[in-house]
Image (cartoon, rainbow, N blue to C red):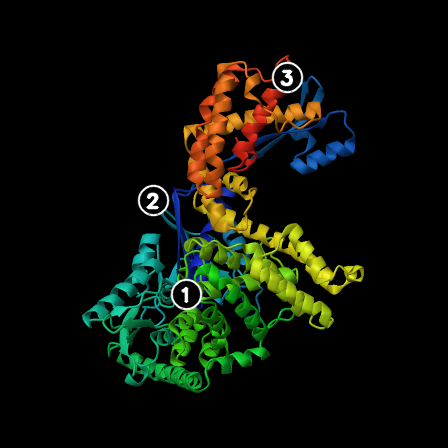
Amino acid sequence: MPDLLIELFSEEIPARMQTRAAEDLKKLITDGLVERGLTYAGAAGFSTPRRLTLTVEGLLAASPATREERRGPRVDAPEKAIEGFLRGAGVSREQCEAREDKKGTFLYAIIEKPGRPAAEIVAEVLEATIRNFPWPKSMRWGAGSLRWVRPLHRILCLLTDEAGAEIVPLDIDGIRAGKTTEGHRFMGDGAFDVSSFEDYEARLKRSKVVLSAEERAETIWHDATNRAFASGLEVVEDRGLLAEVAGLVEWPVVLMGEIGAEFLSLPPEVLQTSMKEHQKFFSVKNPATKRIERFVTVANVETPDHGATILAGNNKVLSARLSDAKFFWENDLRVAKQQGLEAWTEKLGNVTFHHKLGSQRDRIERIAALAREIAPAVGADPALAEQAARVAKADLSTEMVYEFPELQGLMGRYYAEAAGLPAEVANACEEHYSPLGPSDEVPSEPVSIAVALADKLDTLTGFWAIDEKPTGSKDPYALRRAALGVIRLVLANELRLPLDRYADAQILRHKRHLNGEASEADLAALDALVDEIADHGVFGSAFHALLDKLSGKDPAAEGSLFRTVAGLVPDLSTDLLAFFHDRLKVHLREEGLRHDVIDACLAMPGADDIRLLVARAEALSAFLGTDDGENLVQGFKRANNILTQAEEKDGVEYSFGADAKFAESNEEKALFDALDAADAKIVPAMKDEDFATAMGAMAGLRGPIDAFFDAVQVNAENPVVRRNRLNLLSRIRTICLQVADLTKLEG
């Protein structure tokens, strides 16, 4: 069984594309081989800046011969039908057999395909792969039609077995497959022939090429950390940068240089970002002072002076970059100290957030109002929360953030501290964007929580107000991430927040902005409604009663902008809450909670209180994990099914009137007593939100309900007894539904 070696040798491949390209090459080739009947034992893909490599072990020497029987039309079918069948099967009439069965005599095509040699199949698959390779970007060069990420110079394609190596015959736009490759661009020995993957890998290493990206990354990290340790320093870990740098070199040579003393006063994050983004340098910090003092760069060549010339050039370029950063930093600090962060905030009036939702300055005003409202619920000082919200995005106007957008928030904290603002405000400037992803840390300081929630809720309500919600896989404004951020803020800090209240108020603020040229009466009424919702929360029928009050119960007001806009809010808020629930389901499923358990709790009152909802779901999940829980649910469903069928049949609702005096058996009487005892515990427990106690009381019903169904026929002949027992089943349903909507549970 031969082994296959493929190398596609080109000009430098961008580092960000290499890993994916090696995976794509492996998948396209191996899938193509298997589809054509060539199976294999194992395969591995590799990438360096100038090559993609694939090795396939234990490949079949040829595809197996196949024989297929295909049934066609009856022998007396119309000639056109028979011709179509023969054409589709690729056979002649003489190659078919006539076979008789119960329905008549039918034609059967016997399709035999001989096996094909591996070389022929490999050539076919490799050419299709090269011509249709899924590069994010590709180019043409010269007069050929071939497209590749960079000009393709060589194709190496060998099949190796005990008899030796065979070149797979292949020619693509004049590039003929062979057995030749070459090593390092500067330190290699030129072109050389190889005979197998083992020979290929060994010869490359002698020619100063490390084939494995993982090995190059390990070498870089090992040498960098050793150099730093020898100087009493440590390298700042950055796995993304490590992977990128490993894709920039074929023979990594680690060098460590010093940062000029005039730049050491820059914030470490500024130094780290500047060196990473512009130079691809690793930062080296002093563990005692936490300052970035040196850098590590990775060269692609060994030099007689051990990298001194390279380091000198890098230091010259780095000094120019850091001089710019120092200039930005000092200018921004001067503004922060002399004018305060408000100088930058005012400039945000000229920065559009969204053409319908206004400028960043408009957004800040809305966030500040909402942060002040949220503050008491999260234990924050309302004045500090509002102050923090007004300056949290000021750094978007700074020169440093303009140069390095990834430093937004962090630079806000530095400038807030320089301006003498309270520590809570400075921290909120940095933390209000968090959490950005599922692994991001969640703010825990009350002021930061208030501003972070207000920021995310303003974004969500704004795009709901203008009907630009996520659709399918499209989410250009990262609204799913914002919703998950709200959920994580609430759960991590165990907050009790009525989301409906804040969503309603903020949607109205957006609607007021969208209708800024309306009459003064309409705008005043909208402002009054915002204040009322923000202060007290108004829902359901009370919401519409308030509309009547604020519009003076004037029939003419029915068609006013105020009535029209305000009337949309409950539906928008309900739709946004459903969006939160969808994200919560995803989050909780990752935590191990069943989706039907979540649905059973979503159907209960207070579904806009995420912490309450999760506490109920966790208690129900724990309850269902016991034998009593699972069996009780089955007993509940049995009771509910019998009751539902009887109500449909009789056309009445059996919802009250169960009386123990009509009980005929001990099991029936025991169930009455058990329901009374459970109800006495469940009602106060639910009022106190003590779900564990409520579930425990409900679990106690399992035995009496099972005994009741074993001993009693619900649909008794006596109509009075039957009605009483159906009303008893209604009590079971009512008591159990106080805890969760058990009808939503599966199984």
Q: Residue at x 47, y 81 (%)?
A: 399
Question: Alpha carbon of mark 1 to alpha carbon of mark 2: how far?
Answer: 30 Å
Quadrant assignment, res 203: bottom left
**Of the pair 195 and 542, the residue shown nearer to us:** 542
Mark 3 or 1: in front is 3
Mark 2 or 3: in front is 3
Q: What amino acid does circle 2 point to?
A: Glu
Give the mark count.
Answer: 3
Q: Residues within 10 Å of mark 3 (few under 14, many from 20)?
A: few
Question: Alpha carbon of mark 2 to alpha carbon of mark 3: how far?
Answer: 92 Å
Q: Residue at x 31, y 53 (%)?
A: 198
Label pair 1/2, CB-CB below 8 angstroms: no
Q: Is residue 67 left or right of residue 193?
A: right
**Whole-percent x, y for residue 345 in the image:** 52, 78
Q: Residues within 10 Å of mark 1 (few under 14, many from 20)?
A: many
**Mark 3 vs mark 1: which is more N-terminal?**
1
Q: Residue at x 68, y 33 (%)?
A: 92
Q: What amino acid does circle 1 point to?
A: Arg
Mark 1 or 2: in front is 1
Quadrant assignment, res 99: top right
Q: What amino acid does circle 3 point to?
A: Val
The answer to whether residue 148 shows anywhere in this view is no
**Whole-percent x, y for residue 703 in the image:** 45, 23
Q: Is residue 54 left or right of residue 720?
A: left
- Residue 50's tag is 1
User: Circle 2 sits on which residue?
Assistant: 162
Name the secondary structure under disc 3: helix
Establish if 692 lies above or below 519.
Answer: above
**Whole-percent x, y for residue 401 in the image:** 46, 77
User: Circle 3 sits on which residue?
Assistant: 720
- Residue 649's tag is none
